[in-house]
Amino acid sequence: MDSIVVNIGSVDSKRYLRVIISLEVKNSEIEGTIKANKVVFRDKLVSFLSSKELSEMSDRANHKGLRVEIRDLLNSDLLGIDDAISQVYFSDFIIQ
């Protein structure tokens, strides 16, 4: 995924998150589905991340939980397969 930038908390917040997310998928068919629907996946990620509060994002201990939430959200809501995405990785995670 390309870099995603969202306001944290409310729309008028001066705090933001910049994140790059990589997904480990079950097979090349799932990878193709994700690439073909990249806009839909980005939209789901932007909506999810912008709904989070600063306290949920800033604590590194919560990053594992965020990865699980993202994996489960994409698997259930967009792919309809519980184990299509096996891992979510943050290659950048910057809060400003």
Image (tube, rainbow, N blue to C red):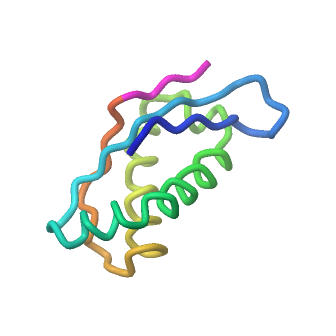
Residue at 38% from the left image edge and 42% from the top image edge: 21
Residue 82 lies, in percent from the top left, at 31, 76
Residue at 35% from the left image edge and 36% from the top image edge: 90
> What secondary structure is the stretch in magenta mostly built from?
strand
| Residue 27 higher or lower than 89, as above or below | below
Residue 30 lies, in percent from the top left, at 25, 70
Image-based side of 24 in relation to 33, left or right:
left
Residue 85 lies, in percent from the top left, at 28, 63
Extreme residue toward the top, this view: 96
**Quarter of image, res 57:** top right
Toward the viewer: 19 or 60?
19
Image-based side of 52 in relation to 25, left or right:
right
| Residue 55 higher or lower than 38, as above or below | above
**Quarter of image, res 28:** bottom left
Q: Over which residues does the magenta segment extend?
A: 92-96
Extreme residue toward the right, this view: 12
Q: Tell me, yes or no, whether the highlighted magenta stretch contains residue 4.
A: no
Quarter of the image with the N terminus is top left
| Residue 89 higher or lower than 26, as above or below | above
Residue 44 lies, in percent from the top left, at 55, 60
